[in-house]
Image (cartoon, rainbow, N blue to C red):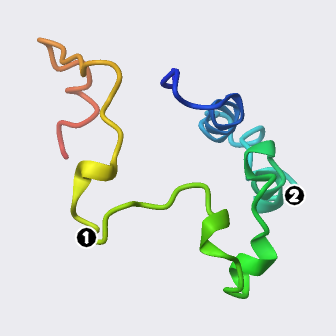
Amino acid sequence: MCPSSFSNELTDLIKKILVIDVTTRLGCMANGNKDIQNHPFFDSINFVKIYHQTENPTNIPYKPTKKDPLDPSSLNQAEEPIRVSRHNLHEEEFKMF
């Protein structure tokens, strides 16, 4: 499901956020967004400092290298080619879209 370049923590976070059942989806249970903030992927992040804007930017997991936000060169290229079906598999769902 996730690229091999993703850490185990990131893969786990994505899988838990993308759960279809809203009652078991990370971030939608009793602790709300705290479950996401407490996930191991965010262990090095101090959300209180981010909220108060006192976090040192070097502690942010991803920092773009380009100044221009529209410059895509700092983004990773997809590992796997995009596969396009010859048939519109979801035509019925999007017929009014």
Q: CA distance from mark 2 to mark 1?
A: 37 Å
**Residue occupying the far top of the picture:** 86
**Residue drawn at (25%, 50%), measured in percent from left and top?**
73
When asked about the image quadrant of residue 51, the answer is bottom right
Tag 2 near tag 1, CB within 8 Å:
no
In the foreground, 54 or 85: 54
When asked about the image quadrant of residue 78, the answer is top left
> The residue tagged with tag 1: helix, strand or loop?
loop
Earlier sequence position, callout 2 versus callout 1: 2
In the foreground, 15 or 55: 55
**Residue occupying the far right of the picture:** 30
**Three-letter amino acid code at disc 1?**
Asp
Instruction: Give x and y (percent) for residue 1.
Output: 51, 20
Instruction: Give x and y (percent) for residue 22.
Output: 69, 42
Q: Which mark is residue 31?
A: 2
Q: Nearer the viewer, mark 2 or mark 1?
A: 1
Within 10 angstroms of label 2, few (less than 14), some, or many (20 or more) residues?
Answer: few
**Residue drawn at (60%, 72%), measured in percent from left and top?**
57
Query: Which residue position is annotated with label 1?
Result: 68
